[in-house]
Amino acid sequence: MRKFLSFVLWALLCCCWTTQAEIFTSISQMTDLIYTEKELVQSLNEYIKAEESKLSAIKSWANKLHALTRMSTSDPEGYLAHPVNAYKLMKRLNTEWSELETLVLQNPSEGFISNMSIHRQFFPDEEDEKGAAKALMRLQDTYQLDSEAFSKGKLPGIHSNVMLTVEDCFDMGKTAYNDADYYHSVLWMQQSLKQLDAEEETEVAKGDILDYLSYSVYQMGDLPRAIELTRRLIPATRGQEETCVILRACLPSSSELNQEDYPPPSEEPIQLGTYTRPKDHLPERDVYEALCRGEGLGMNDVRRSRLYCRYQDRNRNPRLLLKPIKEEDEWDSPRIVRYLDVLSHEETERIKQLAKPRLARATVRDPKTGVLTTANYRVSKSAWLEEEDDPVIARVNQRIEDLTGLEVDTAELLQVANYGVGGQYEPHYDSQAPFDKNPDGNRLATFLNYKDEPDAFKRLGTGNRVATFLNYMSDVEAGGATSSLTLEQLSGRERGRQCFGTIFKSGEGDYRTRHAACPVLVGSKWVSNKWIHERGQEFRRPCGLTEVDRS
């Protein structure tokens, strides 16, 4: 019985843990915390009022008794000679002081503590704070923003009074330092030091900042500057004799430094670009981030002249005759088209309303184990909606079928995604990786990077993804665009736009469809997508004569 109860307790703890973890990956779910915090502030104010009322009553008692005892102690016998005074003394000590004791022992904090305990289970945890900090660093890298820009709220396209304190910058640096990310640790510790030197009030010790900064600079290979920072650290640790002795023992003198190997430290302040960011797992990182900044786009006048816009009724489809859809060519090869105003505001809001309670951390499939898992290169939460959930889902599916001319009965469910702080999805393919053979066919659409998974969609029994229909369901102030790496193309992020792209008619993937969701800099990004598969398209989109035929 005891083992069973232990198991139940463990299961409940696991459930509580999963409900609060990874909140930072969805802006929509983070909005609930705003209202939670508001309710806690109201509860805190009620507690303060109760404490003030209690202290006011006690103070009134103290003032009254102070005057009374001053008079009674001046002539005790004369005071007690009056029978009323004697009675009132007996009454005070027997009854009224007991009432005062009860008042003093009252605990107005119980309501606040109870409210805190209820809400605490939904609080973000340490991993959320760490994830949000890393998101700021990701935005810093992608959009080439220095730490001061974040600290002063100077983000592209938005003016804000939100600022980071010395403590905030210091904690950012510690997060990077604890992950052995000395590149970002240097940037944030330097910003923390800069604000401290500007006499910003803080409880962070200058010695602590210099300690982290000097070691991080040393790890970046800048020994002269690390030595100079360590020398600055010695006065900052005044009173800590043991620390100073160790530091002096470790510091080489100026004569011991080989000037050829170690030039004097630069007098330039440390800033973005002072040190080179270490390479990571993504070989096309520089291209990807440049595209997200709108640099190096491949659109030119010749290509633009081949792009057209039109009203589309899809071969006089009855549902499109009276209200044809606005269609624009976004790219000619591979063909990507954009539709305008396919979903109404009411429909997008209803879809978001349905998805919000079901949002869960978006996953990717581990190519080695085949197990779905979370990954830092995909930061969002998603939900899957069926036609049975609401009539609006059935209408959206039918509309997608009308516009694309493709069968959606074999498509995947409508996926709805909301991106979190710095939410992104690094370069990937939606379909099974190009030219990986799959006996059951390929997807016509875009989703995960299945480069090492020739049988990624075998369990679905509907072939590969052959097309992706993507709905933008919110306006994003900055960042969050969709970039196509091979095409050097950037898609918009405005609400009401829909994009549609396909792979080759043979079912083979197209390397040119490799794309990414750029990190969201400012705003809440909502998208939904429909991945359409090969099966059911035999007569709607028959195979071409060559492996790379699209027409």
Image (cartoon, rainbow, N blue to C red):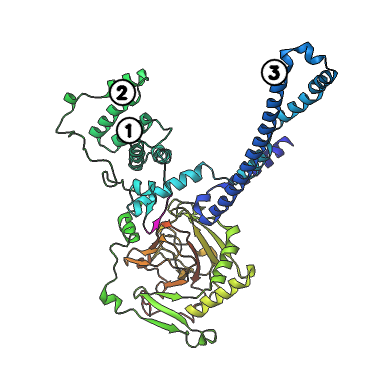
Q: In this picture, is 125 found above or below 83?
A: below
The residue under label 2 is which amino acid type? Leu
Q: Main secondary structure of the magenta part?
A: loop
The residue under label 3 is which amino acid type? Arg
Of the numbered discs 1 and 3, the one sitting upstream in the chain is 3
Viewer-side residue, 427 vs 210: 210
List x then y, in percent, for residue 254: 18, 25
Viewer-side residue, 318 vs 366: 318
Outermost residue, left side? 260
In the rendered image, the quadrant that contains the C terminus is bottom left
Of the numbered discs 3 and 2, the one sitting upstream in the chain is 3
* CA gap, disc 1 and disc 3: 65 Å
The residue beneath circle 2 is 247
The residue beneath circle 3 is 70
* CA gap, disc 2 and disc 1: 12 Å
**Quarter of image, res 221:** top left
* CA gap, disc 3 and disc 2: 63 Å
Q: Secondary structure at mark 3?
A: helix
Q: Secondary structure at mark 2?
A: helix
Q: Is residue 433 left or right of residue 99?
A: left
Viewer-side residue, 339 vs 285: 339
List x then y, in percent, for residue 402: 51, 80
Magenta residues span 156-161
**Residue drawn at 27 percent across, 72 percent down:** 300
Does residue 207 show up? yes
Contact, CB < 8 Å: mark 2 with mark 1? Answer: no
**Residue drawn at 59 percent across, 73 percent down:** 394
Residue 159 counted in the magenta span:
yes
Disc on res. 215:
1
**Quarter of image, res 392:** bottom right
Q: Secondary structure at mark 1?
A: helix
**Residue drawn at 61 percent across, 70 percent down:** 387
